[in-house]
Image: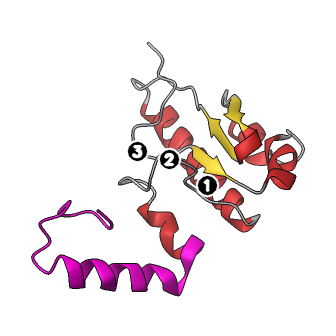
């Protein structure tokens, strides 16, 4: 049984259209090659979104770890190239780790706004953003 999704990390990314070919090329995405995993890239790149489907066997803990590590590296690569770790599917629980790298001080500002609007943390409790 194989899953084309990673239960613990993000894989929809966004980048300026001028960077899409570079981000998606095997030469520029060494993390995919180095992982030894199958990770096809698909997307609707005309609007800057692409998706990496990391294929792994959820019954093999080592594959889960490699898949999560690869998704982390891919997200950070997109951010480093001026893109985003989240193109269209939102932040979710597993992209929170990338918010500081992507938005810097803006992350603290967003958290302060949420705290001001939701002082009792009733909107999506335990999550970074509603």
Q: CA distance from mark 3 to mark 1?
A: 13 Å
Rendered residue at 29%/62% (across/down): 130
Q: CA distance from mark 2 to mark 1?
A: 7 Å
- Image position, residue 18 (x, y; %): 87, 54
Rendered residue at 64%/61% (across/down): 76
Task: Say which element carries label 2.
Answer: loop
Q: CA distance from mark 2 to mark 3?
A: 7 Å
- Image position, residue 64 (x, y; %): 47, 36
Residue 107 on the magenta segment: yes
Residue 87 on the magenta segment: no
Task: Say which element carries label 1.
Answer: helix
Would you say 89 lies left or right of 24 here? Answer: left
Q: Which residue is mark 3?
A: 8
Q: Which residue is mark 1?
A: 75
Would you say 85 lies left or right of 43 here? Answer: left
Rendered residue at 40%/44% (across/down): 8
Instruction: Please state the extent of the stretch shown in magenta in the rendering.
Output: 101-130
Q: Earlier in the sequence, mark 3 or mark 1?
A: 3
For label 3, the crowd category at 10 Å Cα-Cα, with few meaning under 14, some 14 to 19 and many 20 or more, is some
Please say if 42 is above or below 118.
above
Q: Which residue is mark 2?
A: 10
Tell me the quadrant of the picture where the N terminus can be found.
Answer: top left
* Residue 21 quadrant: top right
Rendered residue at 85%/39% (across/down): 26
Question: Which colour style is shown?
Answer: secondary structure
Closer to the observer: label 2 or label 3? 2
Please say if 117 is above or below 87.
below
């Amino acid at each position: 049984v194989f899953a084309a999704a990673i239960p613990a990390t993000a894989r929809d990314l966004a980048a300026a259209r001028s960077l899409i070919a570079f981000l998606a090329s095997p030469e520029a995405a060494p993390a995919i090659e180095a992982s030894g995993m199958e990770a096809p890239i698909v997307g609707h790149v005309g609007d800057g979104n692409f998706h990496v489907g990391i294929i792994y066997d959820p019954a093999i803990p080592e594959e889960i770890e490699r898949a999560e590590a690869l998704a982390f590296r891919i997200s950070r690569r997109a951010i480093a190239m001026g893109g985003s770790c989240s193109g269209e599917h939102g932040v979710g629980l597993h992209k929170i780790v990338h918010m500081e790298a992507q938005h810097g001080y803006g992350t603290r500002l967003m958290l302060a706004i949420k705290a001001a609007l939701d002082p009792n943390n009733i909107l999506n409790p335990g999550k970074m953003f509603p």
